[in-house]
Image (spheres, rainbow, N blue to C red):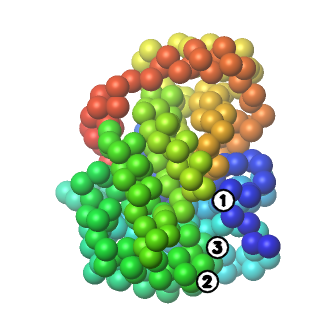
Amino acid sequence: MSPTLRTLPPPRIGLGLAAVGRPGYITLGRDTDLPSVRSAEALKARAFALMDAAHAQGVRYFDAARSYGLAETYLAEWLRARPAVTDVVVGSKWGYTYTAGWRTRAEVHEVKDHSTDAYDRQIAESRALLGGRLDLYQIHSVTPDSPALSDTALHERLARLADEGVTVGLSTSGPGQADTIRAALSVTVGGRPLFGSVQSTYNLLEPSAGAALAEAHDAGWAVIVKEALANGRLADPHIAPGMDALREIAEQEGASCDAVALAAVSARPWADIVLSGAATVDQLTSNLASARVQLPPDRLERLGELAQPASAYWAHRSRLPWA
């Protein structure tokens, strides 16, 4: 029986390729994390090293997107080069087009489009690369005002994809994530729920979607957490000010700050997969150490006090530079 996101064995950590599929992204520390020359071949080598290390350490979910530069290409080529790797779940996303032209300082890095025309084009592109290995296809970065929540023609197309055996999902972003998730829970086609997964930002600084994610999980959806380290703000050496509790608990646990931050998210019973966005193998190994951190209730409660208002969190994120 093929694995699913809700039946994958521990560690329940996935590998996201956003940081290594293109030369520019908003995660902190990229100036030192990536090769000095960020050619397509150099980032391919880095992506392969990460995927090899991840699979060797038990990671069984790999996440890409059409807008992550060459991430889908790297993932497809890695799968073809590793024919024995048949025990993984492969996910990608559509709805953004990469427009930076392999530059770190582009005026526009990606363009959002949730129309049926965009879906038709991008599912064909994803299928051409990943073929039958595509297990999960998500609408990228849905917000409460997205037409993807009400476009019945799009829903019919997505339902046909689901009938082919591909799980249809959505990712969310922005301070209205909870509203988006609850709206998506009500979307049906032919009396059946359309969506089977959601990928949302949730971390110690921004936990506002937690209750809605629990509802999605109770409804049978697979729940994937992205940005669990807040684009590097919960990992050394870029930890945000005021994170004394995180540092102290990490010292008490004998673990790194990133491992503790990831463990706190993994402790949520509704979190099926927590993504690592590592750009180096060392970062990945540190992230995976979170599986060995079992935080007691009092430490989880203290970490919970680090939460910020969602509006403040997303305003700060919007100011992070592409680098």
Tell me, for residue 5, which label it has, or none: 1
Q: Identify which amino acid the numbered label 2 is placed on.
A: Gly
Residue 86 visible, this orientation: yes
> Circle 2 sits on which residue?
132
For this rendering, which residue is in front, 290 or 48?
290
x then y, percent, for residue 207: 47, 32
* Mark 2 surroundings: few (<14), some (14-19) or many (≥20) residues within 10 A: few
For this rendering, which residue is in front, 173 or 75?
173
- Among numbered discs 3 and 1, the one appearing first in the sequence: 1
Report if the CB atoms under discs 3 and 1 are less than 8 Å apart. no
Q: CA–CA distance between discs 3 and 2?
A: 15 Å
**Which-is-in-front pick, marks 3 and 2?**
2
> Circle 3 sits on which residue?
78
Q: Residue at x 50, y 16 (%)?
A: 305
x then y, percent, for residue 257: 61, 27
x then y, percent, for residue 285: 70, 43
Q: Residue at x 35, y 31 (%)?
A: 310
Q: Identify which amino acid the numbered label 1 is placed on.
A: Leu
**Which-is-in-front pick, marks 3 and 1?**
1
